[in-house]
Amino acid sequence: VGNRDDSNLYIHMKLKAAAEIGISANHIKLPNTATEADVLKCIASLNADPAVHGFIVQLPLDSDNPINTEKITNAVAPEKDVDGLSSINAGKLSRGDLGDCFIPCTPKGCMELIRQTGVQVAGKRAVVIGRSKIVGAPMHDLLLWNNATVTTCHSKTSTLAEEVGKADILVVAAGRAEMVKGEWIKPGAIVIDCGINHVPDSTKASGKRVVGDVAYNSAKEKASFITPVPGGVGPMTVAMLMQSTVESAQCFLEKFQPGKWTIQYNQLTLKMPVPSDIEISKSCMPKPIEQVAKEVGLFPDEVELYGQTKAKVQLSVLKRLQNQPDGKYVVVTGITPTPLGEGKSTTTVGLVQALGAHLHQNVFACVRQPSQGPTFGIKGGAAGGGYCQVVPMEEFNLHLTGDIHAITAANNLVAAAIDARMFHELTQSDQALYNRLVPSVNGVRKFSDIQIRRLQKLGINKTDPMALTKEEINAFVRLDIDPGTITWQRVLDTNDRFLRKITIGQSATEKGFSRTAQFDITVSSEIMAVLALADGLDDMKKRFGRMVVASSKKGQPVTADDLGVTGALAVLMKDTVKPNLMQTLEGTPVFVHAGPFANIAHGNSSVLADKIALKLVGKDGFVVTEAGFGADIGMEKFFNIKCRYSGLRPHVVVLVATVRALKMHGGGPAVTAGVPLPKEYTEENLQLVAKGCSNLNKQIQNARMFGVPVVVAVNAFKTDTKAELALVVQHAKEAGAFDAVECTHWAEGGKGALALAQAVQRASQAPNNFRFLYNVELPIVDKIRLIAQQVYGARDIELLPEAQEKVALYTKQGFGNLPICMAKTHLSLSHDPEQKGAPTGFVLPIRDIRASVGAGFLYPLVGTMSTMPGLPTRPCFYDIDLDPVSGEVNGLF
């Protein structure tokens, strides 16, 4: 701070020394008008910067404003306080914690000079003259903890000469020119002179010379070793500053070594019977999310806190860890489920709790963010269950960090842009449209960047708005959208059956231009699928631009880029691209990011979350992610779509099976949500289980088809018998599973998934020959047929007329090489939800085919897919409430 000549000289010396040994050093110079707040703000920035390993505050602070020096030096983070002046470092030194603190550079240099003499400090009598916080006091402590007998003298010491005469080691830092006389010094003593004083000298050009606190010429005759002034302690002080900086960098690298985690796990207090999910969640005291981030090796500037229990993680971590090898990649999927679900999320959480809290492996769970629709509808939340949950569950299941709300806003901006553009084109001439699309501002007309892209797409290589011909203006302003081809709908993250079909444009201001439309639930938006598959902010923006919202009347695709909305979408979505960090009940880290539908989209959490997690866990760690619905849907899309775009290769498939679902596939009565289970599901029935294992066998084959080892997790319910569970394990192994284990994680947390975790560890070392099911360059129909026959067991496919038209259209529009994302019921391997087990010989009807070009896939519709759920007679919201006193949420499950 300021511009003192002496400070500038000292800083120059330090910068020169740093440059000579390869330390990157910078001088941050604040003006003498700087306030205390300005200095503290600068220090806070340096504290948070992981690229800075150490820094010093040059004293004195030359400011016109009052500044508390003590407050400033204590603001420096102790781990970066290479000057050793903070109270924390001083305190550690005073109590002898020499290996856990930075020592002020001058005393440290003095001590090194003493060591260089070869004289043993232990047992010697040492005298320190001076008691400043920078030299005298820490020098006393340093000598004391090196086992010298130390006396500190100062200006009030009445017998100074007598005390000096007793010293085997004398360190002088009094700030008084030649105060210590040579005759005072004990013969053979070591003398360290820290003083820098100016005395008059007419022989010097400056009229003065530099001397120390010791009368050098007389003292050198009695001392065995003595430091000159200048050229003695000063250079050593600079050298020690360099050494402390190197030590700080070494500590930093050791502490933040990629893949080296030190995690505090939470101990579960298990209760029987198992309480409700919300009770268990509330009974857990989550770690501050800032602590979780630090435990897994994230830097402070890579984490954006959203309260105490959730945070967003910057994508910059990928660049920092780009040379770090990836960990093991595990996907959790399941057999064809009952409408109640078979516990994939619970198994995912149980597995990571077992790997982390019990086997002490670096492990991350990567899961989808749930929609609020089911949370308030009939299904409830998706945080797992029992003693295997992401916590706090109310944060997880509700707004989280607002990603879904941002998707709603972005999606509806596109929808509004479509109808507004159609309206304006119908009500204005070409020139009027052009004048409004490219307005004159202060007499200047200019195309925006996105308009330049549209011109280039049209083959118009002009940048001057005045240079376009009438024909070019017509092509530029007319998207000429065919209303019958619009595939983009408005969305809302609420179950609302009355929005499934609506009429828009009924206000008189829309001049009679109305049309039939609909609302979908937000998580079905293509923007959600784009978020899940994007490889970064730039990739996400490009995918937004490619999203096809309709076709023109000439059959050309109309994109978000054509609408001019791409940049605005990127702005609305700029924060959503950062994965959300949370934790499990047992304190293992979780990324919650993206939540695309598993039927009309690929049903997997984000590529970015997986990539960051794989870097953070290190080569021996594990990342466990979950694929929606059964293996025939979510797993197939995980392999053929997500892994294709991400370039990631899985090591293990965990296939979740339950006795309940296998009994259903074996011919058991219908399972209906909200209705008590028939007795066949609560009593032992080995025949039903054995017959239902046909579905398990097929899903094991489906996983092995991709060349990845399969571990079957038999998720045990309290009504299952030992014989039933053993039968499932036996069938799974006979069907080719690498291993099959019984799991009780719902009731026991990670402990109940310990055998599963150990099986996954072994499987991750097994040979792996991952491969895709199809080449994307195959014709659209061939890719659909391969999935139907190889994964579902169909004899063939049948394309209905509308689907045949779409095959021709998308092939013509250049979208034929996109992967396939089948939109099929999750309740059967076939298209008929009533067909259980492993049906064969059926023909799979393809009703229609639609395109999510931005996300990067075509989705054939097998039957009717509802994209807006409805509310049941008694929705979950009847039980959800807020305690106005405590602020606690009640009734979520």
Image (spheres, helix red, strand yellow):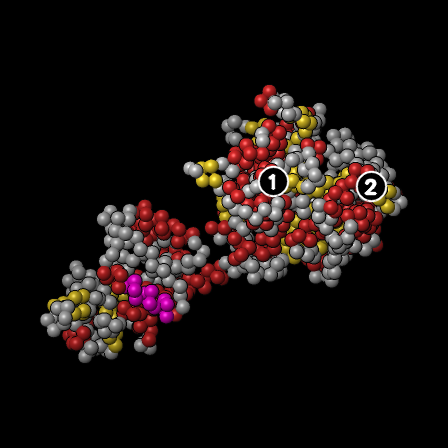
Relative depth, front residue between 85 and 35:
35
Q: Position of residue 146 (x, y in %)?
A: 34, 68
* Residue type, mark 1 in image: Glu
* Residue beneath disc 2: 799
Q: Is residue 879 left or right of residue 163?
A: right
Asked if residue 475 is positioned above or below residue 881 in the image, the reply reads below
Q: Position of residue 564 (x, y in %)?
A: 57, 40
Q: Residue at x 61, y 55 (%)?
A: 614
- Quadrant of the rendering where the N terminus is positioned: bottom left
Q: Residue at x 60, y 32 (%)?
A: 425
- Quadrant of the rendering where the C terminus is positioned: top right
Residues in magenta, as a range: 10-20
Q: Is residue 435 visible?
A: yes
Q: Indicate the quadrant where residue 124 lies.
A: bottom left
Q: Indicate the quadrant where residue 371 lies.
A: top right
* Residue beneath disc 1: 471
**Spatial distance from mark 2 to mark 1, Cα to Cα?**
40 Å
Which mark is in front, 2 or 1? 1
Q: Residue furthest right?
A: 841
Q: Residue at x 62, y 29 (%)?
A: 426
Q: Residue furthest left?
A: 202
Q: Is residue 747 left or right of residue 133?
A: right
Could you tell me what secondary structure mostly forms the magenta stretch? helix
Asked if residue 314 is positioned above or below residue 185 in the image, the reply reads above
